[in-house]
Amino acid sequence: MKLNEILLRVYGSANLVVATVLLAVCLWLGYQPRLLLIELSTSALICAPPVVALHFAALLAQRTGLGRAAAWMVLLAAVPLLALVPAHFFAPLVPGNTLVLAALAILSSYAGLLRHGLSIAQLFNTNDHDRS
């Protein structure tokens, strides 16, 4: 499986988790439909950290010849740091504070990455550098 396909699948999985949780919380709090659309539009950027981390880890593994275990360490360690950025910017728009939103981003990121863990492992295992 190519890198772009894996990135789209991880993004879709993470987006599904974020949108489901935000939709459930907003419906539970009784948000209006117009405000509900604004809340759900933020899920497109909240679930971006796993894609950025995966792209960075794949690029680093390709350029430097990083080992499989080290690539997984870089990938999984970068997610919490990258999750704080959209959480900080979008905390005023969604219910909860920055830490709650960062926890949601981290949870969705790990869910998306681990759901497609076999494809990612195959990506890291390939010796062929044609990952476009």
Image (tube, rainbow, N blue to C red):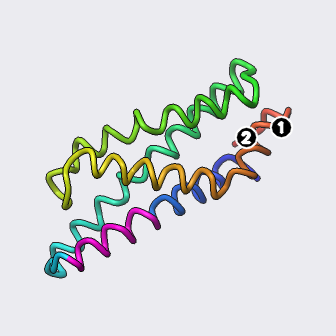
Estimate the x, y position of residue 15 in percent, counting from the top left.
Answer: 45, 62
Q: Are marks 1 and 2 in contact (CB under 8 Å)?
A: yes
Outermost residue toward the top? Answer: 64
81 or 62, nearer to the observer = 81
Q: Where does label 2 land, which residue?
A: 131
Does residue 55 appear left or right of residue 81 in this picture?
right
**Residue found 52% across the figure and 46% down from its top:** 51
The residues colored magenta run 16-28
Q: Main secondary structure of the magenta part?
A: helix
Outermost residue toward the right? Answer: 127
**Which type of secondary structure does the marked residue at label 2 adopt?**
loop
**Residue 18 lies within the magenta run:** yes
Badge 2, how many Cα within 10 Å: few under 14, some, many 20+? few
**Residue found 39% across the figure and 50% down from its top:** 105
Q: Which residue type does callout 2 highlight?
A: Arg
Does residue 122 appear left or right of residue 9 in this picture?
right
